[in-house]
Amino acid sequence: MCTFASPAHIDKCRLEAHVLDITEYHQALVPWRRLDKTKPSGTVLMRSSLPLEQRVLHDRTPEHSKTVSDFTAFVRSAKARLVQDLKLLPTRGEQPSAVQRHNVTLYEDEPARQILLVYAPDNATQLEFISLSLILPAPQQPS
């Protein structure tokens, strides 16, 4: 834990670093659907250390939030799908292990349109990961 104090407020942040030894991964393409039909939907390239249930990711941006960027809407979709119910995260072994919220970290890379979720199930001997990359269609050129 890192703490920074200023006269106005105190900021706290958790400093972390992960080393993932990835010898194999599972990969799938799933659709990403926007609520706002005037904005492009896309495709999500999912890579994970364990097989992940393939479901359409849905935009969770409220209708009145028209100024939200594509990436912000994508992050909200991923959080709603993967972080809201941690029991849905895949774990190793025949008996599913619990995943505690404090053992889950979500990294966002907006310029690359990528999200990395790293988590450690209870009693795990290794970290698990889910990587999501947003692929948007190329903009239409006026003819």
Image: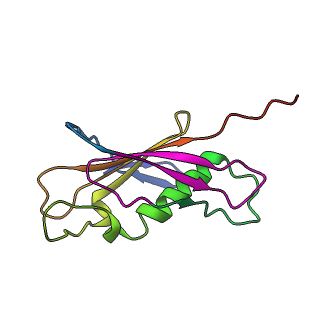
Residue for point 74% across, 66% down: 63
Seen in the image, is 9 located left or right of residue 91? right
* Residue 140 visible: yes
Q: Position of residue 19 (x, y in %)?
A: 23, 38
The residue at the point 31 percent across, 51 percent down is: 1
Please state, as top left, top right, bottom left or bottom right, where the C terminus lies in the image: top right
Residue 49 at what x, y percent from top left?
26, 48
> What is the basis of the colouring in this image?
rainbow
The image shows residue 128 at horizontal and vertical percentages of: 25, 51
User: Quarter-wise, where is residue 101 in the image?
Assistant: bottom left
Measured as percent of width and height from the top left, residue 75 is found at 53, 53
- Tell me if residue 33 is in the magenta stretch: yes
For the image, the number of numbered tags is 0
Q: Is residue 126 left or right of residue 59?
A: left
Does the magenta segment cover residue 5?
no
Question: Which sits in the foreground, 34 or 14?
Answer: 34
Q: Is residue 8 visible?
A: no
Indicate left or right for 86 with 11 as reference: left
- Work out which residue is located at the far right of the displayed protein and give it: 143
Q: Tell whether 75 sits left or right of 4.
A: right
Q: Which residues are magenta?
A: 27-54
Which residue occupies 75% across, 52% down?
67
